[in-house]
Image (tube, rainbow, N blue to C red):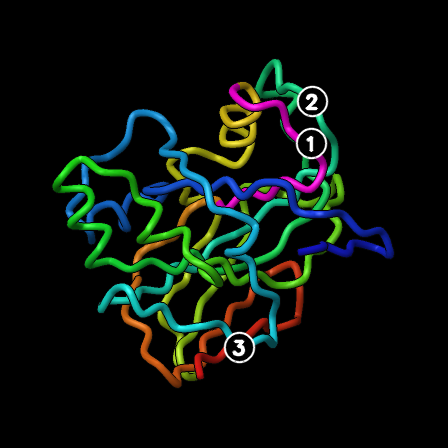
């Protein structure tokens, strides 16, 4: 999938995702509060643009929505210190980390990786990226998620356990960033079930646009 930002296109390289980054979400799933960012990855085939119809997964029975702020990395390189992290961010949008919760719970209980519960095709719907500008306060971005027009989630980046700069620094100190890398930053409380035929959508405070998808 190609990302277009102000007339320039970039091919998505990798999708980094952060789990359990909002305290109330950790509590609603009865998980332990992490001491460090919980990082996993999705393939590029997980992405699906706003307005498209994602395929409903058939290998699980309990699909959950997770509304998240999403970052676009615009430059390559190694993040040496947290104060450098902001220079790597070129765009912001909103999206969903779709999760087969029944599979995830079973995998966790058996100490197995999460991929089949989170990294399946069309499991990362994302909206259009907005250019990140220096005046944007990364620690005060509001966002919300809806199912069939009803608000189900509402969050603010100020509520993150690990702020955006910390996440970028942590990921970029382990992997050298590539232009086109994407970071899903975690979901607030209120996750719940999606069914075939449901329409789900998201908004965030940096844009008046609503991004939406519908399962067929």
- Could you say which disc has been placed on residue 77 in the image? 2
At which x and y percent is residue 18?
A: 42, 40
* Alpha carbon distance from label 2 to label 3: 35 Å
Residue to which mark 3 is pinned? 53
At which x and y percent is residue 86?
A: 66, 31
Is residue 186 magenta-colored? no
* Alpha carbon distance from label 1 to label 3: 31 Å
Image quadrant assignment for residue 26: top left
Residue to which mark 1 is pinned? 88
Looking at the rendering, in which quadrant would you find the C terminus? bottom left
> Could you tell me which residue is drawn at 73 percent across and 38 percent down?
74
* Alpha carbon distance from label 2 to label 1: 8 Å
User: Marks 3 and 2: in contact by CB < 8 Å?
Assistant: no
Image quadrant assignment for residue 55: bottom left
User: Marks 1 and 2: in contact by CB < 8 Å?
Assistant: yes
The residue mark sitting in front, 1 or 3, is 3
Dot 3: few (<14), some (14–19), or many (≥20) neighbours within 10 Å? some
Image mark count: 3
Q: Give the range drawn in magenta.
A: 174-184
Mark nearer the N terminus (2 vs 1): 2
At which x and y percent is residue 141?
A: 55, 51
The residue mark sitting in front, 2 or 3, is 3
């Amino acid at each position: 999938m190609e990302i277009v930002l102000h007339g320039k296109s970039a091919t998505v390289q990798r999708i980094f995702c952060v789990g359990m980054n909002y305290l109330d979400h950790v509590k609603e799933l009865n998980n332990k509060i992490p001491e460090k960012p919980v990082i996993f990855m999705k393939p590029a085939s997980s992405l699906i643009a706003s307005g498209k119809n994602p395929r409903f997964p058939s290998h699980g029975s309990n699909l959950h929505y997770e509304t998240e702020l999403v970052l676009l990395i615009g430059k390559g390189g190694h993040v040496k210190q947290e104060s450098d992290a902001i220079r790597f961010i070129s765009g912001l949008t909103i999206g969903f980390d779709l999760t087969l919760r029944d599979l995830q719970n079973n995998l966790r209980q058996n100490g197995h990786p999460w991929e089949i519960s989170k990294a399946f095709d069309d499991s990362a719907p994302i909206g259009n990226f907005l250019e990140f500008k220096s005046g944007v306060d990364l620690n005060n971005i509001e966002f919300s998620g809806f199912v069939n027009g009803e608000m189900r989630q509402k969050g603010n980046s100020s509520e993150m356990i690990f702020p955006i700069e910390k996440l970028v620094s942590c990921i970029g100190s382990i992997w050298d960033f590539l232009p086109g890398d994407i970071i899903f930053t975690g979901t607030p409380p209120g996750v719940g079930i999606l069914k075939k035929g449901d329409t789900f959508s998201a908004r965030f405070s940096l844009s008046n646009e609503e991004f939406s998808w519908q399962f067929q």
